[in-house]
Image (spheres, grey):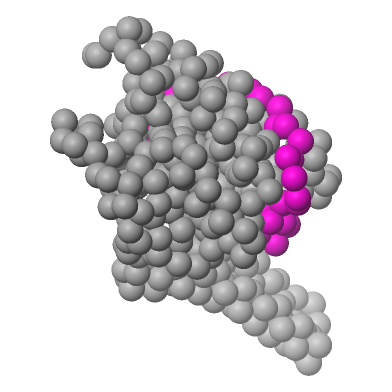
């Protein structure tokens, strides 16, 4: 195994951004300063997920000011998971760090993360100490989600661990091989495995503005995670069907025995109507759960790309330089590209 203690790796930091123009002007210099203390070879990849504010203008100026910055503008709003995927695909560093664009991930943890990497960890992920910035409902739903998605699953997703993490190059390459369309990145991090270490942290107050990821977005992402990494809903339906069959058989035997032994009349209209409505509801629920899985299969077989890049600016860590070839000129690195 390669001894990392004496290595100074090149570092890529990926930040997805959606309407974060007011934060990026201060966040980008601060992150670059923190990265420069760790390595002389760094890049900062900002992925604009179809922002509607002045993010493009801010990033154009930052790319001119800081050659280490690479700006990817997606053709529309694809969502945070595809935006993270775009940044991971573009990152060229020996280690890749993922952070949010709202300034809540403290850059002061980066030296500790790199130290853990040098000690042999392939993944160093940050776990929230508390969720004081969220409502009681969100806290409870989050706890229930992690319990449910890990129920009976061979891949255990760490609770309260987000996207803030450092990954070795081999982990990044493993993630790039996963081409699924319905992406739940927290599950994909866990699925690829590798030697992982957790460190705790307390999120900083949001630098500016408000979060674009509300309760409905969290519920949608949770549903994607459950359907992508758990078959517990299907097993629950199987168990429910078996239980109802046993109950129905037992009730049928009871009614038959009561009629022949005690001469009781068999319950009629009300029992039939209630039974039909109950079982119709169970059938519709089952069909709905199956439809969610089938719908995601439909999305996968279409093989559409996870994202499209409409514009790419900045140099970052050019692949040509890593291979010992001359880096592209500024004009070449600013041409729009499509994926």
| Residue at position x 58%, y 61% in the image | 51
Q: How many marks?
A: 0
Q: Which residues are magenta?
A: 189-218
Residue 219 lies in the magenta stretch = no
For the question of whether residue 332 can be seen, the reply is: yes
Q: Closer to the camera, 216 or 27?
A: 27
Q: Give the side of residue 332 with respect to residue 210, left or right.
A: left
Which quadrant is home to the C terminus? bottom left
Residue reaching furthest to the right? 136
Residue 215 lies in the magenta stretch = yes
Residue reaching furthest to the bottom? 269
| Residue at position x 35%, y 42% in the image | 315
- Quadrant assignment, res 275: bottom right
Residue 194, position as x, y percentages in the image: 36, 28
Residue 170, position as x, y percentages in the image: 29, 32
| Residue at position x 49%, y 40% in the image | 65
- Quadrant assignment, res 1: top left
Q: Closer to the camera, 130 or 147?
A: 130
- When the figure is inspected, residue 52 is found, relative to residue 272, above or below; the finding is above
For the question of whether residue 226 can be seen, the reply is: no
Q: Closer to the camera, 282 or 199?
A: 199
- When the figure is inspected, residue 265 is found, relative to residue 135, above or below; the finding is below
Q: Give the side of residue 13 with respect to residue 317, left or right.
A: right
Q: Closer to the camera, 228 or 199?
A: 199
Residue 71, position as x, y percentages in the image: 45, 49
Residue 215, position as x, y percentages in the image: 73, 57
| Residue at position x 57%, y 74% in the image | 288
């Amino acid at each position: 195994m390669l001894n990392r203690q004496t290595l100074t790796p090149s570092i890529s930091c990926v930040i997805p951004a959606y309407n974060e123009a007011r934060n990026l002007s201060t966040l980008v210099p601060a992150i670059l300063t923190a990265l420069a203390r760790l390595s002389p070879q760094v890049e900062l990849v900002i992925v604009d997920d179809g922002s509607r504010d002045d993010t493009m203008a801010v990033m154009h100026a930052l790319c001119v000011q800081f050659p280490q910055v690479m700006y990817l503008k997606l053709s529309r709003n694809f969502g945070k998971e595809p935006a993270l995927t775009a940044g991971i695909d573009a990152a060229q560093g020996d280690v890749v760090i993922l952070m949010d664009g709202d300034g809540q991930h403290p850059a002061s943890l980066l030296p500790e993360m790199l130290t853990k990497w040098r000690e042999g960890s392939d993944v160093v992920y940050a776990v929230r100490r508390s969720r004081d910035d969220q409502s009681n409902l969100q806290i409870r739903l989050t706890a229930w989600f992690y319990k449910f998605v890990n129920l009976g699953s061979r891949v255990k997703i760490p609770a309260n661990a987000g996207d803030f993490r450092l990954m070795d190059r081999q982990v990044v390459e493993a993630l790039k091989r996963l081409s699924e369309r319905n992406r739940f990145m927290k599950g994909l991090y866990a699925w690829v495995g590798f030697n992982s270490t957790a460190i705790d942290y307390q999120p900083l107050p949001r630098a500016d503005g408000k979060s674009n990821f509300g309760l409905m977005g969290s519920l949608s992402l949770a549903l994607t995670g459950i359907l992508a990494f758990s078959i517990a809903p299907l097993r629950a339906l199987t168990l429910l069907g078996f239980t109802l069959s046993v109950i129905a058989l037992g009730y049928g035997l009871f009614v038959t025995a009561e009629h022949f032994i005690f001469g009781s009349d068999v319950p009629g209209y009300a029992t039939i109507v209630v039974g039909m409505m109950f079982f119709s509801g169970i059938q519709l629920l089952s069909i709905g759960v199956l439809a969610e899985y089938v719908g995601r299969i439909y999305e996968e077989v279409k093989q559409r790309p996870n994202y499209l890049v409409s514009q790419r600016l900045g140099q970052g860590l050019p692949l040509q330089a890593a291979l010992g070839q001359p880096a592209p000129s500024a004009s070449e690195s600013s041409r729009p590209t499509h994926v």
